[in-house]
Image: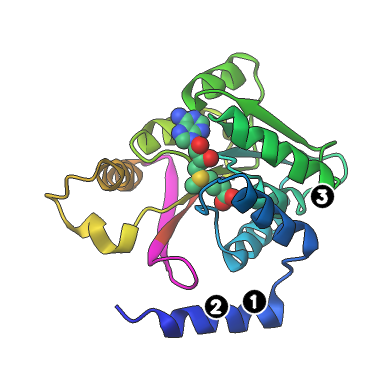
Amino acid sequence: MDTSLFESVDQYIGNLLGDEDAVLKGTLKSMKDAGIPGINVSANQGKFLQLLAKLCNAKKILEIGTLGGYSTIWLARALPADGQLITLELEQAYADVARQNIIKAGLDPVVDIKVGRAMDSLAALDAEDSGPFDMIFIDADKPPYTEYFEWALKLSRPGTLIVADNVIREGKVLDDNCDDERVSGVQRFNKALADNKQVTATIIQTVGTKEHDGMAIVVVK
Ligand SMILES: C[S@@+](CC[C@H](N)C(=O)[O-])C[C@H]1O[C@@H](n2cnc3c(N)ncnc32)[C@H](O)[C@@H]1O
């Protein structure tokens, strides 16, 4: 697929309407310097997540998959001063870089990074009655996406917005015989979403500076 047009249009949109400031650019640089893979959302996707958080008047956001804090910063900037964002990350080294970036963004009073397996952190959040969250962004390892979704539902209320990234994977979700566990993970999630009567959802395809993919947009009934 020739993706150069999608990339150019993504640049055009970013130049017109993007808010990727020095802190966000510095976050990407810090990740590169630390050898952290560039698997963050794109700038326009970050802005899109921020708009979604504003649209649902989010005061409490849960993010599963912090990496270097890039999407965290986009999301946390949508919060009011007394808002809260909890973000879950497996890798201590990534969380350390993210923490520095969040401090540089002035967002440390509202962002809490929990290091460990997301499944354990989610169980702990539930046990501590930390929910319900207004918005939940699922963007960690793909095989347990369905289980993350089940936890997200437990930590939700009617009206909670759940967003799950990377659920189309360049169209590989169409291949029932794909042996990539990331693809089978999101295929299982997409099916669970379709079968779940507690939510209403769609998936938007995403193109641009990142490869062709998709974000599931889910509202809890
Ligand atoms: C796609 S990246 C997140 C990107 C980030 N949301 C952004 O756009 O800036 C996925 C992250 O999930 C983390 N991760 C992978 N497996 C995990 C697990 N079992 N528990 C928690 N985090 C995990 C990875 O270390 C990685 O940082």
Q: Residues at badges 1 and 2 in contact (C-beta under 8 Å)?
A: yes
Structural distance between the alpha carbons of marks 1 and 3: 20 Å
The residue nearer to you, when weighing 144 against 181, is: 181
Which residue is identified by label 3? 105
Where residue 205 appears, as percent x and y from the top left, is 40, 67
| Position above or below: 176 against 120 | below
Structural distance between the alpha carbons of marks 1 and 2: 6 Å
Which residue is identified by label 2? 10
Which residue is identified by label 1? 14
Where residue 41 appears, as percent x and y from the top left, is 55, 57
Amino acid under label 1?
Gly
Residue displayed at 61% across by 21% down = 125
Q: Is residue 188 left or right of residue 219?
A: left
Pointer 1: residues within 10 angstroms few (<14), some, or many (20+)?
some
Where residue 104 appears, as percent x and y from the top left, is 83, 47
Amino acid under label 2?
Asp
Residue displayed at 50% across by 24% down = 117
Mark yes or no: residue 221 visible: no
